[in-house]
Amino acid sequence: MEYRQVGSSGLEISAIGLGCTNFGTRATDEQAAEIIHAAIERGITLVDTANSYSAGKSEEAVGRALRGRRDQVILTSKFAQPMGEGPMNCGGSRHHIMRAVEDSLRRLQTDRIDLYQMHIPDPVVPIEETLRTLDDLIRQGKVRYIGSSCFEAWQLAEAEWTSRTSSLERFISTQCHYSLLTRDVEHHVLPVCEKYGIGVLPFFSLESGLLTGKYRADGELPPDARAAKFPQFFFGVMNEANFAKIEALHEFAAARGRTLTELSLASILAKPAVSAVVVGAMSPQQLDGSVAALDWKLTPEELAEIDEIAPSPVPNWLSFLHRTAAPVGRT
């Protein structure tokens, strides 16, 4: 296993992290425990969940699986997604965070969360209120480090500036959707993270199975496939152009005796700002496929060839300048 520093912080994590989105829904408690224990045995230390995954069931499954093994992992969770009706059951307010962290600690059966992340931006609550509350949680010992998720570049810069000017704890990391098929973050989020020492923890780097070779353009979707059950995860990526890229990437990897999974993860891990890639798994065998990516250090020539196969889109700066924060779902 390879271990990396999260941005410019003192926190070190495994370069492959275990995403726990499936726990509590697709995976039973027994399966979740088997996968988490297998991850630990393979040297994976980053275990990533959220209070909104399966309405808290993922945290509960993780908490049960980590009994007696809590100190072997860097445990993360998230807040800000709606956890009930009403405006105070979501977002980045002090009221919501104080309640959310206590609920997460109870479900996780732990006394602290190693990395507590704001799941989505809150366009209503000032970021200073959010950071000041998280700063308090660190001082109380309930949280060790804090991070963000799904933040735009300007929101990361604003949070960094607020932390510096108000002498508050800062976001050491950010999670974002980043894969060989979704590369727009390379033009705005990654440069900001490199500049300010924010570790990037990409998710959906395998595009929910598309970049494992699981789905082909001419194939029927199995009824139990993730793409059939959760089509929203594939909106905009399951198309003819991307399938052509996938086929070319598969051939590139196969010519080097590697798998498409290894290529997909190795290429993302080659970016300087990336601290770890968060991947899901439904079996220990899937973990092996992800961990194998760490053995492949792509050369500059190979990275250039990959860029030709699956190029990063040219940014539309006019569109970028007019982006607005997504609402957090207040009702």
Image (cartoon, helix red, strand yellow):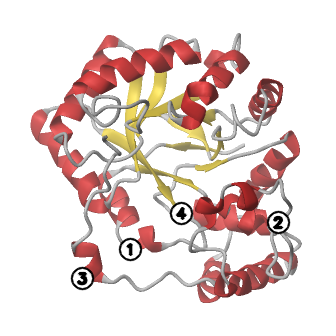
Assess disc 2: are there few (<14), some (14-19) or many (≥20) residues with their C-alpha within 10 Å of its C-alpha: few
Whole-number angstrom distance, CA of label 3 to CA of label 4: 22 Å
Residue at image mark 3: 318
Label 4, label 2: how many angstroms apart (C-alpha)?
19 Å
Element carrying mark 4: loop
Q: Where is 201 relative to 110, above or below?
A: below
Mark closer to the observer (2, 1): 2
Quadrant of image for the N terminus = top right
Image position, residue 123 (x, y; %): 23, 49
Mark earlier in primary sequence (3, 4): 4
Residue with the mark numbered 1: 187
Question: For the residue carrying disc 3, how many other residues have a C-alpha within 10 Å: few (<14), some (14-19), or many (20+)?
Answer: few
Q: Label 3, label 1: how many angstroms apart (C-alpha)? A: 13 Å
The residue wearing badge 2 is 214
Tell me, for residue 322, which label it has, or none: none
Distance CA(mark 2)–CA(mark 1): 29 Å
Mark 2 and mark 1 lie on one chain; the one further toward the N terminus is 1
First in sequence: mark 4 or mark 2? 4
What amino acid is found at the position of numbered circle 2 in the picture? Lys
Identify the residue under disc 4: 178
Taking 93 as reference, is 309 above or below it? below
Asked whether the residues under the numbered discs 3 and 1 touch, taking CB atoms below 8 Å apart as contact, a structural biologist would say no
Above or below: residue 242 compared with residue 68 = below
Q: How far apart are marks 4 and 1 (CA)?
A: 12 Å
Q: Is tag 2's residue or tag 3's residue first in the polypeptide sequence?
A: 2
**Crowd tier of the residue under label 4, counting other residues whose Cα lies within 10 Å: few below 14, some 14–19, many 20 or above:** many
